[in-house]
Amino acid sequence: MAEQTSGLKLVVGLGNPGYEYVLTPHNLGFMAVDRVAETYGAEISRPQGQILTARISLNETPVMLAKPQTYMNLSGPAIGRALEKNGIPADDLIVLVDDANLPLGMLRIRERGSAGGHNGLKSIIGVIHSDRFTRVRMGVRPDHAVSDLAGYVLGRFRKADLETVGEMVYRAAEAVEVILREGTPTAMNRYNRRAAS
């Protein structure tokens, strides 16, 4: 039975658990949702099923921040259970995710759409049977030739890229606040045209 959680929003960062995945492109979702938590003095550490969670209040809106502890490709069931348990509709879900189709440093916010080849998004859409949720995509496409893209997104960022990555994580967290305060269209207008210089 769903808990009574009037107006609760779910903000999920996608990533892979484990030290070996820290500071890898595929873990940008974890980094960005951790940044949101840090801004509000919270830590995403409370277990709920297969996710770690934290609760914050943003402009009197209750928000659950979450990091699935399954691997990226299996994120859907954990997120589906969190939505169901807390009585949250799909359109109150915000997902922070890396995107190898966007240049490193670029943000792209969308209110709905296909998985775009991303297995984490594909898993979520397959489980909740809806693509009507907001996603904040963070570009990870490198500016140098990469022969093995799968290996690249699971490998550590180059030191030279860390400043760009840090700036993008900061803007992604900021974008989540704008989405929750002012709505997704406002955030799209503000952030979709901005890429790291």
Image (cartoon, rainbow, N blue to C red):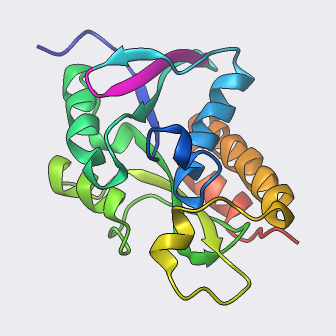
Q: Residue at x 45, y 73 (%)?
A: 150
Taking the image as shown, residue 96 lies to the left or right of residue 141, namely left
Q: Position of residue 1 (x, y in %)?
A: 11, 13
For residue 121, above or below residue 15: below
Q: Position of residue 6 (x, y in %)?
A: 35, 15
Q: Closest to the observer: 54 or 177?
A: 54
Q: Closest to the observer: 45 or 55?
A: 45
Q: Position of residue 131 (x, y in %)?
A: 28, 58
Taking the image as shown, residue 34 lies to the left or right of residue 89, namely right
User: How many numbered marks does the figure carry?
Assistant: 0
Taking the image as shown, residue 89 lies to the left or right of residue 18, namely left
For residue 178, above or below residue 97: above
Q: Residue at x 23, y 10 (%)?
A: 3
* The magenta stretch spans residue 162: no
Q: Closest to the observer: 175 or 28?
A: 28
Q: Residue at x 73, y 71 (%)?
A: 193
Q: Which secondary structure class fits the magenta region best?
A: strand
Residues in magenta, as a range: 49-57
Q: Closest to the observer: 161 or 117?
A: 161
Taking the image as shown, residue 27 lies to the left or right of residue 78, namely right
For residue 150, above or below residue 124: below
